[in-house]
Amino acid sequence: MLDRLLALETSGIKLGLDNISRLCAALGHPERTFTTLHVAGTNGKGSVTAMVHAALVAAGVRAGRYISPHLVDLSERFVIGSGPIDTEALRRAAEHVLDCADALKAAGSLPIHPTFFEATTAIAFELFRRARVDVAVIEVGLGGRYDSTNVIAPAAGAITSIGFDHQQWLGETIEAIAFEKAGIVKSGMDLVIGILPDEARRVVCDVAAGQQARVIDAAHGARVTRDARGDRDELIIETPDDRYGPLSLALRGEHQVGNALVAIRLLEAARHRGIRVSRDAIERGLIEVDWPGRLELIRLPGGGQVLLDAAHNVDGARALAAYLRRRHPERPALVVGMMRDKDVEGIMGALLPVASAVVATAAATARAIPARELAARIAATGPSVPLRAEPDPPRAVEQALSSSRTVCVAGSIFVVGAVRDGLRRRAILR
């Protein structure tokens, strides 16, 4: 049954709500059986989703989480409580949803078969209904306005950041991208926003005003106090509602401080909407959250280490570069792979100054730039560090380790997933 679902990945991306709306209606609207929190953004939406979910679980709320894409295994997209989804439960829900889609298609009620993302979104809703979830934190897949997740009516939502990515789907200007992200705003809801470019903020606020939604600027009236402790900063975060800390964030990187602030303000907004989550639970969510592949440091036998980061656009690369500059002045070797729609020159412009060598690689997908082609494009930018190509991501890491005891893997969540899976298979990561 899961092979039947995975076969839909060849259908590609199709933005629009018609298919998912008809499918949810035929399923009896599972998305209406629990309270939802909706998280959009160019970068940071996954981290905020993970932190918010972890806090809800710490508060004793029966909470679900839906994210995309996954690193290694499809089941990562669906979380209920603190553990992974049961494989048999996933199989049964997938079978039910796909059978329903087939019946709709046969009856002429569905013009085309659902895409992979439409199907997995419906499966998430069905899983959460069957598990009697009270609150689900839903991460937007792409954009917002026409993303399949946008059939929900959230109690509150967030837009973490807005930058350039997926322009072929969302538009070539910040204003156009902001309009698509702001499509998650529903009538009367609370919307938390992170630090946005001025032009994006204006668009989001205009859309929110039209929906009579309240915009909460995460940084407004907030203060963050830091105390450097080893490789982590100890933080005290104060908002107009409460004071959190001292605490050390589980997720590394300066950008995660801003994400934590968005998560806190979203949880506070949820609390005002009747979701019971205490200060202690919010703090635990920030310090206990598990979000692999985001500045995840894995120490290897023999003293080497691999830093995995899913940075795949220019803003993400700049955040990674800032972290490497501060925490890894030794300049690690970089293993990098990218999809065809990415800004290779912009991403490498951010990362090359903090790398001692580069190994270009590629994920096992038709969307990936082949390793040799990527290496040629990087070479055209004029790097002053050694550069080579190795198509297999785990072998690329081994090559990089021959020149540096620290290796950073970035550029694509699919490359990060392949490396992480390789480490798991070698019993380095469990």
Image (cartoon, rainbow, N blue to C red):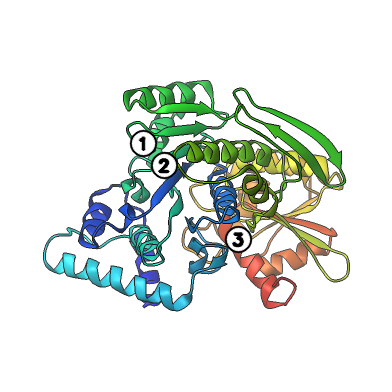
Residue that label 2 marks:
143
Q: Is mark 2 on a helix, strand or loop?
A: loop
Q: How far apart are marks 2 and 3 (CA)?
A: 22 Å
Q: Is there CB contact under 8 Å for labels 1 and 2?
A: yes
- Identify the mark nearer the N-term, 2 or 3: 2
- Identify the mark nearer the N-term, 3 or 1: 1
Question: Which residue is painted at 47% across and 42% down in the image?
Answer: 40
Q: As rendered, which of 286 and 101 lies closer to the eye? A: 286
Q: Between tags 2 and 3, which lies in front? A: 2
Q: As rendered, which of 266 and 67 lies closer to the eye? A: 266
| Label disc, if present, on residue 415 of the rendered structure | 3
Q: Distance between the residues labelled 1 and 2?
A: 8 Å
Q: Is mark 1 on a helix, strand or loop?
A: helix
Question: Which residue is painted at 27% across and 54% down in the image?
Answer: 20
Q: Is mark 3 on a helix, strand or loop?
A: helix
Q: Residues within 10 Å of mark 1 (few under 14, many from 20)?
A: some
Residue that label 1 marks:
183
Q: Residues within 10 Å of mark 3 (few under 14, many from 20)?
A: many
- Residue 351: percent from the left, percent from the top? 70, 43
- Residue 24: percent from the left, percent from the top? 26, 57
Q: Between tags 3 and 1, which lies in front? A: 1
Residue 131 vertical position relative to residue 43 in the rendered view, above or below:
below
Work out whether residue 104 can be spotted: yes
Residue type (three-letter) at the residue carrying disc 2: Gly
Q: As rendered, which of 332 and 253 lies closer to the eye? A: 253
Q: As rendered, which of 243 and 373 lies closer to the eye? A: 243
Residue 405 vertical position relative to residue 103 in the rendered view, above or below:
above
Residue type (three-letter) at the residue carrying disc 3: Val
Decide if residue 129 is on the left or right side of residue 398.
Answer: left
Q: Is there CB contact under 8 Å for labels 3 and 1?
A: no
Q: Is there CB contact under 8 Å for labels 2 and 3?
A: no
Decide if residue 331 is on the left or right side of residue 168.
Answer: right
